[in-house]
Amino acid sequence: MTKVFEPIITVAGRQFVRIPVKTKILTAEDRMADIIREFALPQMKPGDIVSISESPLAITQGRAIPVSELKIGILARILWRFVAKVPYGIGLRAPASMQCAIDECGAGRIILAAAAGAIGKLFKIKGLFYIVAGMQAALIDAAETSPVPPYNETVIKGPLEPAKAAQEIADELGIRVAVMDINDIGGCWMIGASEGVSKHFMERVMKDNPQGQGDELTPLCIVRRI
């Protein structure tokens, strides 16, 4: 379902408009710089920032893995059951996404993270699993997170080197770029950006997730001061 949002937001007493940019369904055959050039650049003005959702960037890097191609080991089949339920998605609470975390981070680190998570539960401390496992584990999107085929049947790992990817796009196109990880319940993190983009600003200006995370097909968003 397409999300309804207020395009104008006030940050530090100044107004900004967020312009979601609709694209085609992205694949590993696409280059994000080319997608921005085709769909966003014609709408951009000097001073604009383009926000890229982290999962679409990861898709263009070949980081979407069909569940049917995953070899799920016994460790993943055991550990996923110990991941806490969260209101913003499945995360690693599925054998397929847990297997991707093990592949990405290593079995030893995930076992340590699971132990830390168990200790955290005893003392009612949240988030220890992901603190130990690291950002790449936290960025994994389980199958069914996206309603858009074929990604409803894939696990999407986090993008590789998002800051480097953002800077390369910025250098190629002459614009400012941020890579964002956002959900619909208030979570908003900038995980990489080109030079001159403020993490604090982007997390405030994008906090209500103007791009949505359903079937909008808007992996890009232009941020413009009014």
Image (spheres, grey):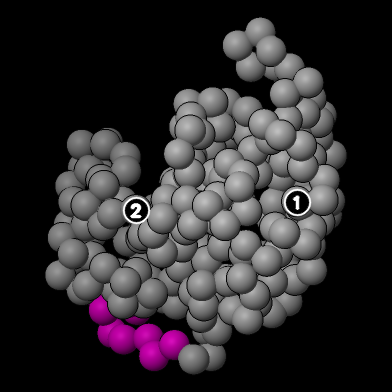
Q: Which corner quadrant holds the C terminus? A: top right
Mark 1 vs 2, N-terminal side: 1
Residue sitting at x 64%, y 75%: 30
Q: Could you say whether the residue bearing mark 2 is in a helix, strand or loop?
A: helix
> Disc number at residue 135?
2
> Disc number at residue 41?
1
Q: Nearer the viewer, residue 3 or 92?
A: 3
| Residue 48 magenta | no
Asked whether residue 199 appears in the rendered view, the answer is yes
Q: Could you say whether the residue bearing mark 1 is in a helix, strand or loop?
A: helix
Compared to 163, does 8 lie above or below?
above
Are there few (<14), some (14-19), or many (20+) residues within 10 Å of tag 2?
few
Which amino acid, by three-letter code, is at mark 2?
A: Met
Residue 29, x across and y down, in percent: 63, 81
Toward which corner of the image does residue 215 lie, by quadrant?
bottom right
Residue 73, x across and y down, in percent: 31, 86
In the image, 42: left or right of 51?
A: right
In the image, 53: left or right of 103?
A: right
Toward which corner of the image does residue 122 lie, by quadrant?
top left
- Please name which of the two marks, 1 or 2, marks the residue nearer to the observer: 1
Asked whether residue 93 appears in the rendered view, the answer is no
Compared to 35, does 64 lie above or below?
below
Residue sitting at x 79%, y 68%: 24
Which region shows up in magenta?
A: 70-78
Which amino acid, by three-letter code, is at mark 1?
A: Leu
Residue sitting at x 17%, y 47%: 119
